[in-house]
């Protein structure tokens, strides 16, 4: 007949100026467990040594007990010898201490100058990492031009389908509704002055020069940029990227460049499609609300837009696609090796992409004004 394992036990016996803590029995969280404060009582010690005597099965309850003992030792400036514990217990206790230290690392008592300085330092670090990553992508692109046969075209075509064709429904809906909104807003003002036909001018110019590229970029950032970050983050958590580096394969060439090329090629196509749907949305409002015939609306649209407006939209869309791809892949490669880290990487990719889109759009507005485009 097999003997039942004894309940968890912990005894603290003085030894010189220290304590010897004996652990044994069956440590299960579903059973009565010793509490460190009760075990040590009011004893003081300069050192604590753990001894194992008949330790049976154990779970997180033993890890929690040892962690409480370690915290007590830290507060009493006492050393703690855990060499007698099983190696998995020591490892789990160390991981628990690291996690708690990270939670307590933020100091809310810092003054405003320290906070601003740390924020500026972090911003400079992220800017430098982004610049280094852009440099790596540039060198990889140069290698693609020199040796196109080594490029993974199959992966690129697959990503083009995912970030291009699969994004058509959401781009269609958002662009059409933006065109409707612009036309309705313009109609409220222009009808007071009898300039209903100028709704076509407002919708055409706004869509081609700003809204088409920006709204497509925002949709692609939320859909494709987050997907890139999640995919690469999962690969990093699964140590797949480490395996590629061990085999001598650069992750930028193997993973980043196909996604970068695919999104750079598909974003202009989505933008031109979005421009057409935005103009069509304005046409629907003009025909239904302002009673403007579609042919008159189209003629007025053709009279106000020219090749420079189309060029502006294409240039913006190409740059926006590159920025979104770079931001998504960078955040994915920087992700922590956990499920929570992958989620934070996807969120950071969307935020970074949209921020870069806004900054780039402002730069383009100034640049095109200087160039007269």
Image (cartoon, rainbow, N blue to C red):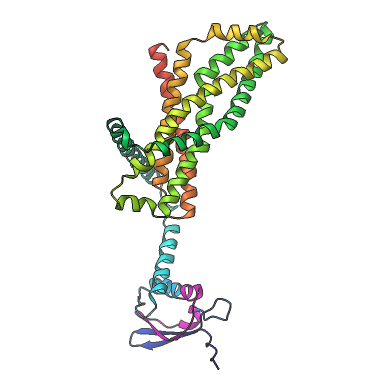
**Foreground residue among 301 and 69:** 301
Answer above or below: position of 141 versus 97. Answer: above
**Foreground residue among 258 and 284:** 258
- Quadrant for the N terminus in the image: bottom right
Answer above or below: position of 226 versus 100. Answer: above
- Quadrant for the C terminus in the image: top left
Q: Give x and y (percent) for residue 237.
A: 42, 54
Which residues, given as a range, are shown in magenta? 36-65
Is 56 a magenta residue? yes
> How many marks on residues?
0
Residue at far bottom of view: 1
Q: Give x and y (percent) for residue 370.
A: 38, 14
Residue at the image position 54 percent from the left and 14 percent from the top: 205
**Foreground residue among 249 and 302:** 249
In the picture, residue 17 is in which quadrant?
A: bottom left
Q: Give x and y (percent) for residue 69.
A: 43, 75
Q: Judge whether residue 201 can be spotted in this image.
A: yes
Is 96 on the left-hand or right-hand side of 31?
A: left
Residue at the image position 55 percent from the left and 8 percent from the top: 302
Q: Give x and y (percent) for residue 166.
A: 55, 35
**Foreground residue among 175 and 189:** 175
């Amino acid at each position: 007949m097999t003997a039942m394992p004894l309940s968890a036990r912990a005894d603290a016996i003085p030894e010189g100026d220290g304590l010897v803590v004996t652990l044994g029995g069956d440590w299960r969280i579903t059973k009565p467990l010793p509490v460190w404060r009760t075990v040590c009582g009011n004893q003081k010690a300069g050192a604590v040594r753990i001894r194992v005597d008949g330790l049976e099965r154990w779970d997180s309850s033993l890890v929690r007990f040892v962690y409480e003992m370690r915290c007590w030792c830290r507060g009493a400036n006492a050393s703690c010898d855990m060499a007698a514990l099983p190696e998995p217990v020591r490892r789990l206790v160390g991981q628990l201490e690291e996690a708690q230290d990270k939670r307590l690392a933020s100091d809310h008592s810092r003054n405003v100058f320290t906070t601003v300085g740390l924020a500026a330092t972090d911003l400079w670090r992220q800017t430098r990492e982004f610049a280094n990553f852009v440099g790596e992508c540039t060198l990889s692109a140069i290698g693609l031009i020199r040796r196109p046969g080594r490029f993974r075209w199959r992966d690129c075509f697959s990503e083009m389908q995912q970030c291009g064709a699969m994004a058509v429904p959401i781009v269609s809906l958002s662009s059409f509704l933006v065109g409707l909104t612009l036309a309705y807003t313009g109609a409220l003002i222009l009808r007071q002055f009898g300039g209903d036909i100028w709704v076509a001018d407002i919708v055409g110019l706004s869509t081609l020069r700003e809204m088409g590229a920006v709204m497509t970029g925002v949709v692609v950032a939320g859909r494709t940029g987050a997907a890139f970050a999640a995919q690469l983050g999962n690969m990093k958590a699964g140590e797949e990227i480490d395996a590629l580096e061990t085999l001598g394969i650069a992750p930028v060439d193997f993973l980043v460049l196909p996604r970068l090329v695919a999104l750079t090629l598909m974003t202009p196509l989505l933008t031109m499609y979005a421009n057409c749907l935005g103009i069509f949305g304005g046409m629907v409002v003009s025909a239904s609300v302002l009673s403007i015939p579609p042919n008159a609306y189209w003629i007025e649209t053709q009279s106000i837009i020219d090749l420079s407006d189309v060029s502006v939209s294409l240039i913006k869309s190409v740059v926006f696609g590159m920025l979104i791809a770079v931001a998504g892949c960078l955040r994915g490669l920087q992700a922590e090796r956990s499920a929570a880290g992958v989620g934070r990487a996807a969120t950071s990719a969307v935020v970074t992409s949209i921020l870069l889109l806004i900054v780039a759009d402002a730069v383009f507005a100034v640049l095109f004004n200087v160039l007269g485009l």
